[in-house]
Amino acid sequence: MKSSTKLVLTILHVIAWIIFLGLCVKTGAILYSFFVSLAINPKGAGNIYMGLDLSSLYSFDKGNYVGIVSVMIILSFLNAFLFYLVVKIFLKINFVCYSEILPSLIYRTSDDKNLTLTKITSN
């Protein structure tokens, strides 16, 4: 494998790690702010994450507030999990030859579940 290709893959691996850690921090911040606004200070709903003001929703209906913030937490977690799989793909890449584990990892991240694993490995 060319050294420039290996360098590009290494840079992409580092970028994927940075994005993964950033998304984990974002998920944790939303989760922490949510629990603080529920248990300690209801005014915390005024700034859930980066200026998002859900205080009017909290005062209108606590159930809707819990539902909306739960969806935000789930979506943020799924973004972090997606980049976890990307980091895992970069860890499994064998720089010498093609690995058999890689197609199954890529298959897990694809939207097209009708795509069979034999189509991936035959290409």
Image (cartoon, rainbow, N blue to C red):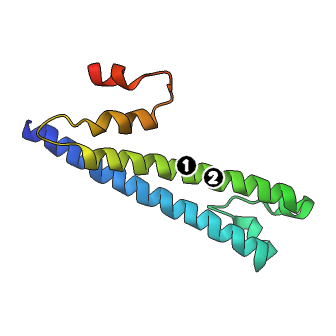
The residue that mark 1 highlights is: 78
> Can you see residue 56?
no
Q: CA distance from mark 1 to mark 2?
A: 6 Å
The residue that mark 2 highlights is: 74
Q: Quadrant of residue 34?
A: bottom right
Amino acid type assigned to the residue bearing label 2 in the image: Ile
Tell me what residue is drawn at x 15 percent, y 45 percent: 7
Tell me what residue is drawn at x 69 percent, y 51 percent: 71
Tell me the SS state at disc 2. Answer: helix
In the rendered structure, are the residues bearing label 1 and label 2 in contact, judged by CB atoms less than 8 Å apart? yes
Taking the image as shown, residue 50 lies to the left or right of residue 80, namely right
**The C terminus lies in which quarter of the figure?**
top left
| Residue found at the far bottom of this picture | 40
Q: Is residue 119 above or below residue 105?
A: above
Q: Quadrant of residue 4?
A: top left
The one of 78 and 22 positioned closer to us in this rendering:
78
> Can you see residue 57?
yes
